[in-house]
Image (spheres, coloured by chain):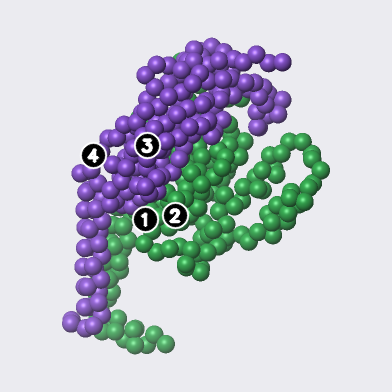
Chain colours: A purple, B green
Amino acid sequence: MHSIFSRINNISAFLSSCTMALLACVALSSFLFTADPKGTLSISPVKVFPSKTNRYPRRIQEMGFVNFNISADLTPLFHWNTKQLFLYLEAEYQNAQGVNNTVVIWDRIVRRPEDAVINFVGKNKYAFREISSSFKKVPSSYYSLKYNVMPHVGVLTYGEAARTIEPVDFVWEEHV
Amino acid sequence: MFTEELRAFRRLGFRHVLLQVLNFASVIASGLMIWKGLGLITNTESPIVVVLSGSMEPAFYRGDLLFLTNPASERYHTGDITVYKIPGADIPIVHRVLETHDVSKTVKIPGLDTKQPGDQLLLTKGDNNYVDDIELYQGLDWLEKKHIVGKVRGHRSHLVNIRQIPTLRRLRHDRDERLPSVKIRITRYPRPIGVNTARIIVAVLTRPRPPSYLVSSSV
Protein backbone atom coordinates (compact mmCIF):
# COMPACT_ATOMS: atom_id res chain seq x y z
CA MET A 1 0.00 0.00 0.00
CA HIS A 2 2.72 2.46 0.90
CA SER A 3 5.34 1.23 -1.52
CA ILE A 4 7.76 3.60 -3.24
CA PHE A 5 5.89 3.26 -6.54
CA SER A 6 2.54 4.29 -5.10
CA ARG A 7 4.24 7.35 -3.56
CA ILE A 8 5.85 8.29 -6.89
CA ASN A 9 2.50 7.78 -8.60
CA ASN A 10 0.69 10.03 -6.10
CA ILE A 11 3.31 12.77 -6.28
CA SER A 12 3.42 12.83 -10.07
CA ALA A 13 -0.38 12.85 -10.34
CA PHE A 14 -0.56 15.74 -7.86
CA LEU A 15 2.21 17.61 -9.69
CA SER A 16 0.52 17.26 -13.05
CA SER A 17 -2.82 18.50 -11.75
CA CYS A 18 -1.04 21.45 -10.08
CA THR A 19 0.66 22.25 -13.39
CA MET A 20 -2.64 22.14 -15.26
CA ALA A 21 -4.24 24.46 -12.67
CA LEU A 22 -1.28 26.86 -12.91
CA LEU A 23 -1.46 26.92 -16.72
CA ALA A 24 -5.20 27.62 -16.52
CA CYS A 25 -4.51 30.52 -14.13
CA VAL A 26 -1.87 31.92 -16.47
CA ALA A 27 -4.27 31.63 -19.41
CA LEU A 28 -7.05 33.37 -17.44
CA SER A 29 -4.70 36.11 -16.23
CA SER A 30 -4.27 37.44 -19.75
CA PHE A 31 -7.92 38.54 -19.72
CA LEU A 32 -6.94 41.08 -17.04
CA PHE A 33 -4.75 42.96 -19.51
CA THR A 34 -7.13 44.89 -21.71
CA ALA A 35 -4.81 47.33 -23.46
CA ASP A 36 -6.18 48.74 -26.71
CA PRO A 37 -3.42 50.89 -28.23
CA LYS A 38 -4.16 53.01 -31.27
CA GLY A 39 -1.86 54.25 -34.00
CA THR A 40 -2.11 56.11 -37.26
CA LEU A 41 -2.17 54.79 -40.78
CA SER A 42 -1.90 56.82 -43.97
CA ILE A 43 -2.10 55.45 -47.48
CA SER A 44 -1.39 57.19 -50.77
CA PRO A 45 -3.63 56.46 -53.81
CA VAL A 46 -3.05 52.87 -54.89
CA LYS A 47 -1.38 52.51 -58.29
CA VAL A 48 -2.64 49.69 -60.48
CA PHE A 49 -0.53 47.97 -63.14
CA PRO A 50 -1.34 45.03 -65.40
CA SER A 51 0.83 41.99 -64.80
CA LYS A 52 1.11 38.30 -65.52
CA THR A 53 -0.22 35.74 -63.07
CA ASN A 54 2.12 33.35 -61.37
CA ARG A 55 0.07 30.31 -62.06
CA TYR A 56 -1.37 30.93 -65.50
CA PRO A 57 1.35 32.62 -67.57
CA ARG A 58 -1.02 33.78 -70.33
CA ARG A 59 -3.63 35.35 -68.09
CA ILE A 60 -3.30 39.08 -67.45
CA GLN A 61 -4.14 40.36 -64.01
CA GLU A 62 -4.03 43.77 -62.36
CA MET A 63 -1.80 44.32 -59.36
CA GLY A 64 -2.23 47.10 -56.82
CA PHE A 65 0.84 48.82 -55.39
CA VAL A 66 0.22 50.40 -52.00
CA ASN A 67 2.53 52.92 -50.36
CA PHE A 68 1.77 53.49 -46.71
CA ASN A 69 2.98 54.93 -43.41
CA ILE A 70 2.32 53.24 -40.11
CA SER A 71 3.08 54.67 -36.72
CA ALA A 72 1.85 52.91 -33.63
CA ASP A 73 3.11 52.15 -30.14
CA LEU A 74 2.01 48.61 -29.33
CA THR A 75 4.16 48.07 -26.22
CA PRO A 76 1.05 47.97 -23.92
CA LEU A 77 0.09 44.67 -25.60
CA PHE A 78 3.13 42.96 -24.14
CA HIS A 79 2.54 41.32 -20.78
CA TRP A 80 3.94 38.24 -19.13
CA ASN A 81 1.89 35.81 -21.22
CA THR A 82 2.55 37.47 -24.59
CA LYS A 83 4.69 35.33 -26.83
CA GLN A 84 4.51 37.53 -29.90
CA LEU A 85 2.41 39.97 -31.87
CA PHE A 86 1.38 39.32 -35.42
CA LEU A 87 0.72 42.67 -37.08
CA TYR A 88 -0.97 42.88 -40.45
CA LEU A 89 -2.24 45.55 -42.82
CA GLU A 90 -5.46 44.61 -44.51
CA ALA A 91 -7.34 46.03 -47.51
CA GLU A 92 -11.14 45.74 -47.54
CA TYR A 93 -13.31 46.41 -50.56
CA GLN A 94 -16.36 45.20 -52.41
CA ASN A 95 -16.08 44.39 -56.10
CA ALA A 96 -18.68 44.73 -58.87
CA GLN A 97 -19.94 41.15 -58.40
CA GLY A 98 -20.77 41.86 -54.76
CA VAL A 99 -17.87 39.87 -53.33
CA ASN A 100 -16.54 41.32 -50.08
CA ASN A 101 -12.80 40.99 -50.09
CA THR A 102 -10.19 41.33 -47.39
CA VAL A 103 -6.59 40.98 -48.46
CA VAL A 104 -3.52 41.10 -46.24
CA ILE A 105 -0.88 43.16 -48.02
CA TRP A 106 1.78 43.50 -45.35
CA ASP A 107 2.63 41.80 -42.08
CA ARG A 108 5.24 41.81 -39.37
CA ILE A 109 6.02 39.61 -36.40
CA VAL A 110 6.96 41.50 -33.22
CA ARG A 111 8.62 39.36 -30.60
CA ARG A 112 10.00 41.90 -28.11
CA PRO A 113 8.44 44.95 -26.48
CA GLU A 114 11.49 46.94 -27.65
CA ASP A 115 10.38 46.35 -31.25
CA ALA A 116 6.74 47.18 -30.61
CA VAL A 117 7.07 50.88 -31.47
CA ILE A 118 6.24 50.68 -35.15
CA ASN A 119 7.32 53.45 -37.49
CA PHE A 120 7.17 51.97 -40.92
CA VAL A 121 7.21 53.58 -44.34
CA GLY A 122 7.01 51.23 -47.27
CA LYS A 123 4.98 49.29 -49.75
CA ASN A 124 3.01 46.08 -49.82
CA LYS A 125 4.77 42.78 -49.26
CA TYR A 126 2.13 40.49 -50.76
CA ALA A 127 0.42 40.75 -54.13
CA PHE A 128 -2.74 42.85 -54.05
CA ARG A 129 -5.00 41.28 -56.70
CA GLU A 130 -8.70 41.14 -57.50
CA ILE A 131 -10.37 37.77 -58.08
CA SER A 132 -12.05 39.07 -61.23
CA SER A 133 -8.48 40.05 -62.27
CA SER A 134 -9.32 43.76 -62.65
CA PHE A 135 -9.85 46.65 -60.23
CA LYS A 136 -11.73 48.59 -62.98
CA LYS A 137 -15.14 48.56 -61.27
CA VAL A 138 -13.83 48.83 -57.73
CA PRO A 139 -14.17 52.45 -56.68
CA SER A 140 -11.94 52.45 -53.63
CA SER A 141 -10.94 50.43 -50.62
CA TYR A 142 -10.44 50.81 -46.89
CA TYR A 143 -7.32 49.79 -45.03
CA SER A 144 -6.78 48.76 -41.44
CA LEU A 145 -3.87 47.74 -39.28
CA LYS A 146 -4.77 44.73 -37.16
CA TYR A 147 -2.94 42.62 -34.64
CA ASN A 148 -3.11 39.16 -33.21
CA VAL A 149 -1.73 38.69 -29.69
CA MET A 150 -0.32 35.18 -29.37
CA PRO A 151 0.09 33.92 -25.80
CA HIS A 152 2.43 31.30 -24.39
CA VAL A 153 -0.62 29.53 -22.95
CA GLY A 154 -4.19 30.53 -23.62
CA VAL A 155 -6.55 32.11 -26.08
CA LEU A 156 -5.49 33.99 -29.19
CA THR A 157 -6.89 37.54 -29.22
CA TYR A 158 -7.35 39.98 -32.08
CA GLY A 159 -7.60 43.75 -32.28
CA GLU A 160 -7.41 46.74 -34.54
CA ALA A 161 -4.75 49.42 -34.10
CA ALA A 162 -5.51 51.85 -36.91
CA ARG A 163 -7.92 52.40 -39.80
CA THR A 164 -8.22 54.76 -42.76
CA ILE A 165 -11.26 56.98 -42.28
CA GLU A 166 -11.59 57.98 -45.93
CA PRO A 167 -11.59 55.32 -48.66
CA VAL A 168 -8.41 55.21 -50.75
CA ASP A 169 -8.80 55.37 -54.55
CA PHE A 170 -7.21 53.19 -57.19
CA VAL A 171 -5.19 55.04 -59.83
CA TRP A 172 -4.32 53.71 -63.28
CA GLU A 173 -1.01 54.94 -64.61
CA GLU A 174 -0.57 55.61 -68.33
CA HIS A 175 1.76 53.15 -70.02
CA VAL A 176 4.12 53.70 -72.89
CA MET B 1 7.48 -17.86 -18.63
CA PHE B 2 4.14 -16.54 -17.43
CA THR B 3 3.61 -19.26 -14.83
CA GLU B 4 3.78 -16.76 -11.98
CA GLU B 5 1.15 -14.49 -13.55
CA LEU B 6 -1.07 -17.40 -14.49
CA ARG B 7 -0.91 -18.66 -10.95
CA ALA B 8 -1.85 -15.24 -9.65
CA PHE B 9 -4.82 -15.07 -12.02
CA ARG B 10 -5.96 -18.56 -10.92
CA ARG B 11 -5.73 -17.50 -7.30
CA LEU B 12 -7.83 -14.36 -7.89
CA GLY B 13 -10.56 -16.20 -9.72
CA PHE B 14 -12.39 -15.70 -12.98
CA ARG B 15 -14.68 -12.92 -11.74
CA HIS B 16 -11.74 -10.81 -10.63
CA VAL B 17 -10.10 -11.13 -14.05
CA LEU B 18 -13.36 -10.08 -15.67
CA LEU B 19 -13.49 -7.06 -13.36
CA GLN B 20 -9.99 -6.09 -14.41
CA VAL B 21 -10.96 -6.33 -18.09
CA LEU B 22 -14.03 -4.18 -17.40
CA ASN B 23 -11.93 -1.57 -15.62
CA PHE B 24 -9.49 -1.43 -18.50
CA ALA B 25 -12.31 -1.13 -21.03
CA SER B 26 -13.95 1.68 -19.06
CA VAL B 27 -10.68 3.66 -18.96
CA ILE B 28 -10.32 3.39 -22.73
CA ALA B 29 -14.00 4.14 -23.34
CA SER B 30 -13.98 7.26 -21.15
CA GLY B 31 -10.91 8.57 -22.99
CA LEU B 32 -12.62 8.03 -26.30
CA MET B 33 -15.83 9.63 -24.99
CA ILE B 34 -13.99 12.75 -23.83
CA TRP B 35 -12.25 13.05 -27.20
CA LYS B 36 -15.43 12.51 -29.25
CA GLY B 37 -17.46 14.72 -26.89
CA LEU B 38 -14.97 17.55 -27.36
CA GLY B 39 -15.19 16.99 -31.09
CA LEU B 40 -18.99 17.22 -30.92
CA ILE B 41 -18.91 20.47 -28.90
CA THR B 42 -16.29 22.12 -31.09
CA ASN B 43 -17.71 20.64 -34.32
CA THR B 44 -14.33 19.51 -35.58
CA GLU B 45 -12.96 16.06 -36.25
CA SER B 46 -9.88 16.64 -34.10
CA PRO B 47 -10.29 19.39 -31.46
CA ILE B 48 -6.66 19.16 -30.30
CA VAL B 49 -3.80 18.87 -32.79
CA VAL B 50 -0.04 18.79 -32.52
CA VAL B 51 2.07 21.01 -34.76
CA LEU B 52 4.32 18.94 -37.00
CA SER B 53 5.87 21.57 -39.25
CA GLY B 54 7.99 24.66 -38.78
CA SER B 55 6.05 26.77 -41.25
CA MET B 56 4.36 28.84 -38.51
CA GLU B 57 7.53 29.59 -36.52
CA PRO B 58 8.02 31.59 -34.36
CA ALA B 59 4.32 31.38 -33.46
CA PHE B 60 4.05 27.62 -33.27
CA TYR B 61 6.94 25.21 -32.97
CA ARG B 62 6.85 21.50 -33.59
CA GLY B 63 5.20 19.79 -30.66
CA ASP B 64 2.95 22.70 -29.63
CA LEU B 65 -0.65 21.87 -28.84
CA LEU B 66 -3.43 23.74 -30.62
CA PHE B 67 -7.10 23.81 -29.62
CA LEU B 68 -9.53 24.08 -32.52
CA THR B 69 -13.18 25.01 -32.93
CA ASN B 70 -15.23 25.02 -36.10
CA PRO B 71 -18.87 26.08 -35.51
CA ALA B 72 -21.13 25.59 -38.51
CA SER B 73 -21.78 29.34 -38.77
CA GLU B 74 -18.07 30.16 -38.59
CA ARG B 75 -16.72 32.96 -40.82
CA TYR B 76 -13.01 33.14 -41.33
CA HIS B 77 -11.15 36.44 -41.22
CA THR B 78 -7.69 37.47 -42.26
CA GLY B 79 -5.21 36.79 -39.49
CA ASP B 80 -7.11 33.71 -38.27
CA ILE B 81 -5.03 30.57 -38.06
CA THR B 82 -6.80 27.66 -39.69
CA VAL B 83 -6.11 23.97 -39.99
CA TYR B 84 -7.05 22.68 -43.41
CA LYS B 85 -6.92 19.39 -45.23
CA ILE B 86 -6.78 19.24 -49.00
CA PRO B 87 -8.45 16.16 -50.50
CA GLY B 88 -5.68 13.77 -51.47
CA ALA B 89 -3.16 15.21 -49.03
CA ASP B 90 -2.55 13.02 -46.00
CA ILE B 91 -1.46 15.69 -43.49
CA PRO B 92 -3.60 18.63 -42.31
CA ILE B 93 -1.77 21.96 -42.51
CA VAL B 94 -1.82 24.81 -39.95
CA HIS B 95 -1.54 28.18 -41.70
CA ARG B 96 -2.80 31.75 -41.39
CA VAL B 97 -5.53 33.22 -43.58
CA LEU B 98 -4.12 35.82 -46.00
CA GLU B 99 -7.17 36.60 -48.16
CA THR B 100 -10.91 36.12 -47.73
CA HIS B 101 -13.52 36.62 -50.45
CA ASP B 102 -17.10 36.55 -49.16
CA VAL B 103 -19.66 35.95 -51.89
CA SER B 104 -22.88 37.92 -51.29
CA LYS B 105 -24.81 37.06 -54.47
CA THR B 106 -24.65 34.19 -56.92
CA VAL B 107 -21.57 34.77 -59.00
CA LYS B 108 -19.37 32.92 -61.48
CA ILE B 109 -15.71 33.18 -60.59
CA PRO B 110 -13.18 32.23 -63.30
CA GLY B 111 -11.89 28.71 -62.79
CA LEU B 112 -14.61 27.72 -60.29
CA ASP B 113 -18.23 26.60 -60.43
CA THR B 114 -20.97 29.07 -59.52
CA LYS B 115 -20.71 30.32 -55.96
CA GLN B 116 -23.76 30.88 -53.75
CA PRO B 117 -24.21 33.72 -51.23
CA GLY B 118 -22.45 32.84 -48.01
CA ASP B 119 -19.63 30.95 -49.67
CA GLN B 120 -16.16 32.05 -48.78
CA LEU B 121 -12.93 31.68 -50.75
CA LEU B 122 -9.73 31.69 -48.72
CA LEU B 123 -6.02 31.90 -49.35
CA THR B 124 -3.56 30.99 -46.60
CA LYS B 125 0.13 31.39 -45.90
CA GLY B 126 2.52 30.08 -43.27
CA ASP B 127 4.16 32.83 -41.18
CA ASN B 128 7.54 31.32 -41.85
CA ASN B 129 7.04 30.84 -45.61
CA TYR B 130 7.86 33.48 -48.19
CA VAL B 131 4.95 32.72 -50.50
CA ASP B 132 1.29 31.85 -50.11
CA ASP B 133 0.03 28.27 -50.09
CA ILE B 134 -1.32 28.04 -53.63
CA GLU B 135 1.31 25.43 -54.48
CA LEU B 136 0.10 23.26 -51.61
CA TYR B 137 -3.54 23.23 -52.75
CA GLN B 138 -2.88 20.48 -55.32
CA GLY B 139 -4.50 22.31 -58.21
CA LEU B 140 -7.20 24.20 -56.30
CA ASP B 141 -7.16 27.98 -56.63
CA TRP B 142 -8.87 28.72 -53.31
CA LEU B 143 -9.64 27.03 -50.04
CA GLU B 144 -13.27 26.71 -49.08
CA LYS B 145 -15.21 26.00 -45.89
CA LYS B 146 -15.32 22.27 -46.65
CA HIS B 147 -11.53 22.03 -46.55
CA ILE B 148 -11.17 23.68 -43.14
CA VAL B 149 -10.80 21.36 -40.15
CA GLY B 150 -10.90 24.16 -37.58
CA LYS B 151 -9.78 27.58 -36.42
CA VAL B 152 -7.04 27.79 -33.80
CA ARG B 153 -8.51 29.28 -30.59
CA GLY B 154 -5.93 28.44 -27.98
CA HIS B 155 -2.37 27.36 -27.78
CA ARG B 156 0.01 25.67 -25.38
CA SER B 157 3.74 25.80 -26.04
CA HIS B 158 5.56 22.49 -26.21
CA LEU B 159 6.91 21.20 -22.92
CA VAL B 160 9.36 18.86 -24.60
CA ASN B 161 11.32 19.99 -27.61
CA ILE B 162 10.39 17.53 -30.32
CA ARG B 163 13.65 18.21 -32.17
CA GLN B 164 15.60 16.76 -29.27
CA ILE B 165 13.86 13.39 -29.39
CA PRO B 166 15.86 11.36 -31.88
CA THR B 167 13.03 9.02 -32.89
CA LEU B 168 10.82 11.95 -33.81
CA ARG B 169 13.45 13.76 -35.82
CA ARG B 170 12.24 12.22 -39.04
CA LEU B 171 8.96 14.07 -38.68
CA ARG B 172 10.83 17.15 -39.79
CA HIS B 173 10.49 16.07 -43.39
CA ASP B 174 7.14 17.73 -43.57
CA ARG B 175 5.12 19.48 -46.18
CA ASP B 176 7.28 22.57 -46.38
CA GLU B 177 10.39 20.66 -47.05
CA ARG B 178 8.53 18.74 -49.70
CA LEU B 179 7.57 21.96 -51.46
CA PRO B 180 10.19 21.66 -54.25
CA SER B 181 8.68 18.42 -55.52
CA VAL B 182 5.27 20.04 -55.75
CA LYS B 183 6.74 22.98 -57.65
CA ILE B 184 8.39 20.75 -60.22
CA ARG B 185 5.14 18.97 -60.91
CA ILE B 186 3.28 22.20 -61.50
CA THR B 187 5.78 23.76 -63.91
CA ARG B 188 3.93 23.91 -67.20
CA TYR B 189 6.56 24.60 -69.80
CA PRO B 190 9.66 22.49 -70.31
CA ARG B 191 12.70 24.47 -69.30
CA PRO B 192 16.36 23.56 -69.61
CA ILE B 193 17.42 21.95 -66.34
CA GLY B 194 19.78 24.26 -64.51
CA VAL B 195 22.16 23.24 -61.75
CA ASN B 196 19.68 24.36 -59.13
CA THR B 197 16.77 22.42 -60.57
CA ALA B 198 18.93 19.32 -60.89
CA ARG B 199 19.98 19.73 -57.27
CA ILE B 200 16.35 20.03 -56.15
CA ILE B 201 15.38 16.93 -58.14
CA VAL B 202 18.24 14.94 -56.57
CA ALA B 203 17.24 16.19 -53.13
CA VAL B 204 13.62 15.22 -53.71
CA LEU B 205 14.47 11.77 -55.06
CA THR B 206 16.83 11.00 -52.23
CA ARG B 207 14.85 12.55 -49.40
CA PRO B 208 14.24 10.28 -46.41
CA ARG B 209 10.59 9.36 -46.09
CA PRO B 210 8.96 9.39 -42.67
CA PRO B 211 7.44 6.05 -41.75
CA SER B 212 3.69 6.21 -42.23
CA TYR B 213 2.86 5.46 -38.60
CA LEU B 214 4.68 8.61 -37.48
CA VAL B 215 2.74 10.93 -39.78
CA SER B 216 -0.45 11.83 -38.02
CA SER B 217 -1.52 15.09 -36.60
CA SER B 218 -4.12 14.16 -34.05
CA VAL B 219 -3.07 13.19 -30.59
- Of badges 1 and 4, the one in the foreground is 4
The residue sitting at 39% across, 32% down in the picture is A71
Going by the picture, which residue comes out furthest to the right? B192
Query: Dots 3 and 4: beta carbons under 8 Å?
Result: no
Q: Which mark is residue A34?
A: 4
- Of badges 1 and 3, the one in the foreground is 3
**Could you say whether the residue bearing mark 3 is in a helix, strand or loop?**
strand
Q: Which of marks 2 and 1 is nearer the N terminus?
A: 2
User: Is residue B45 among the parts visible in the rendering?
Assistant: no
Q: What residue type is labelled 2?
A: Tyr
Q: How far apart are marks 2 and 1 (CA)?
A: 8 Å
Residue identifier under label 3: A147
The residue sitting at 25% across, 38% down in the picture is A35
Query: Dots 2 and 1: beta carbons under 8 Å?
Result: yes
Which of the two residues, B30 or B93, is positioned nearer the viewer here?
Answer: B93
Q: How far apart are marks 1 and 3 (CA)?
A: 20 Å
Percent position (x, y) of residue B75?
38, 30
Q: Earlier in the sequence, mark 3 or mark 4?
A: 4
Which of the two residues, B83 or B129, is positioned nearer the viewer here?
Answer: B129
Q: Which mark is residue B157?
A: 1
* Horizontal side, residue B14 vs residue B58: left or right: left
Residue identifier under label 2: B61
